[in-house]
Image (cartoon, helix red, strand yellow):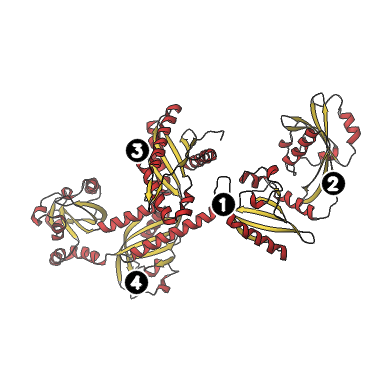
Amino acid sequence: MLDKNLSYEQLNILFEQSKDFVFLSERIDGDYVYRYVNRAATSIFNADVIGKSIQQVNLNTAENVIIKYYDRALERNEQQNFQDYSFHASEARKYETTVIPIIRDEKQYILAMTKELAFERDLQDKYLFTRSLFYKTFLSTVLLSKDLKLLEANPVFLKMFQLDFEQARNQDFLELGIVKKDQMDNWRQSLMHMNEDYAFDTQILHFTDANGQLRSFMTTITPLIDGEVRAFFLILQEITKHLEQQKIIERTKHVLGTFKNAMNSAADITITDIDGVITDVNDRFVERTGYEREEIIGRTHQVVNARYHPPSFFKELWKTIASGKVWRGEICNRNKNGVTYWNETTIIPLVDVTGQVTQYLGVHYDISEKKRAINQLHTIEKKFRLITENTNDLIVIMDGHGMITYASSSYARLLGYKEEDLVGRFYEQILHENSQKTWRNLLQHNMHTGIEVRLELQLLSKNEETFWTEAHCKDVYEQEKGNMYQIIMISREMTERKERENNLKFLAYHDSLTNIPNRRFLIEEFPRYVEWAADNKDVIALLFVDGDDFKEVNDRFGHDVGDEFIRKFSEALSNCMRANDLVVRLGGDEFVILLPGLSRDENERTEQVDRFIRRVQVRLLEGWEIEGHVFKPTASIGVAFYPDHAQQLDDLLDLADKALYYAKSFHKNHYQIYHATL
């Protein structure tokens, strides 16, 4: 509502025919509400704005620029003028606004009159035009004078480095504490070079934020020229995470390269893309197939396909690995000379950090001899004994109930029994308890079908030593023996291979430096923790732990000491865990801890977390010694609760990270539980 001395009729008489834009706004609670706009001004709005605040109206000019000058006019009780750019119909226009304060009966008004200016792009106009383009961008923008004084910075830059513009303005940019001292000479040399050739430049620059963290930016530096270089306009795009991801990729490549070298001596190895095109093979595969490496790379496994298996076999194989699951099975292949051979193949999907399958790793063991042995068992009784008694394969014949009627001597050698002690036993009696259920299910559901069954069983020796075996089992119907079934099973001891597969899985789900679980392990296990919490009706605490001043350890003592420091740090955290707690290393000095089984009562839960964190703090302060140097580190911790704060892992991590950031802003060795006001 207008003041009694400021009627619509009076304002219309004065301004309705004006071609300039005229606005009357009332200041209410720090914002400005439109009370009058003339006919010319209504053309820039999409709807009626009377009664709406400036921040509710989507203007092309930045709202805080307008409010800044409105506030200044009222504070100083004097007219203010400012110029800026706006956009209409894809055209840049320059405006000058006169701001007049009006104070009536303790109410504060602003009369603003804006007129369009014809302009030429002088130096100041060029900068104002550029600033109008980048004012609301997600990029950081900075204007520096020729002698590197800070003239202007957009809100993104000021917020990122927590700078007060009024204090930082006209200060030496290099002395604001965001440029490291060892980088200052590079800055000056780059800008001196631009003074000479007037050319813009793009380079990677490093800044230190308010938390002391080094952050990297792809920076475009453009000189503003008016006969000579007068100023520099900087556009900064942060690439810190991108550079960190590149380092992680390089480390992963190194680990995979080491593993590849280890596997080369044990099996035939192939790597394909997601379409099955071979991208790499080891020397054993080249030797096995008889092809040159150049004849294999870029082709699919069709190059060695023996045409033995039906299309449905490969369809099921692809269905399994495309879902991210490991496939194991036997494949008949053919080498370059036309000779067929059998492989026991394990195909492992390799996934990226997002969980997407990007490649397939194939581990192939030649089992041609074993396959021939199985075929001969069906047809040649005499050769059977010769083969079984002189092979390391474990061969056993049982009746339909699983009682042993024959066991090869390799069983006696492996398990420490006499051959006659094995005959008459049930096969289940020489199995480890972990495999007994698998064996019983086989006897109950998979026998009397005539189909060969593959399974992995763990044997138990006479002295209770365990051995993993890979077994191929088939029942044989013998009409001449009164329609009886016999079970024939050939196994190969695979303890070492099982260990290699377990090691491969361990590498995928554990941090290579500390051997504690990694982010992928956390993603896999978190749903189980959620199920436990739902069943027990309790709460999970997610703690985001960040070591204080870890970078200083690397800088002062080197990366070898830094790596050992991280290992000691992870050991200290692990020693504080309860039986069901989980500690995970995300990277660098960042760790995540899951604490299940907490109370739903907020006060009691807070006490539980406080006791745990204090236990961690005490353990860290006990310290450790590395190469004669004693370290007593501290850590900052952010805490979020499931399900109170969030129910998804990514959301919990984000909230705990916010709490961590808040904790670090106070002082070191501090923790903060997330709440909505952070």
Please say whether residue 544 is visible from this viewpoint.
Answer: yes
Q: Residue 484, can we see it? A: no
**Mark 1 = which residue?**
215
Which is closer to the viewer, label 3 or label 2?
3
Query: Quick check: 235 above or below 522?
Result: below
Looking at the image, residue 165 sits to the left or right of residue 213; the answer is right
Q: Nearer the viewer, mark 3 or mark 1?
A: 1
Residue 289 circle label: 4
Front label number (1 vs 2): 1
Density class for disc 1 (Cα within 10 Å; few <14, some 14-19, many ≥20) is some
Residue 4 in the image, given as x and y percentages of width and height: 85, 24
Residue closer to the observer: 627 or 148: 627
Name the secondary structure under disc 4.
helix
The disc placed on residue 578 is: 3
Is there CB contact under 8 Å for labels 4 and 1?
A: no
Q: Secondary structure at mark 3?
A: loop
Sequence-first disc among 1 and 2: 2
Between residue 480 and residue 159, name the one nearer to us: 159
Amino acid tagged 4: Thr
Which residue bears the numbered disc 2?
116
Given this view, does label 2 or label 4 mark the residue nearer the observer? 2
Residue drawn 47% across and 53% down?
A: 556
Label 1: which secondary element: strand
Mark nearer the N terminus (4 vs 1): 1
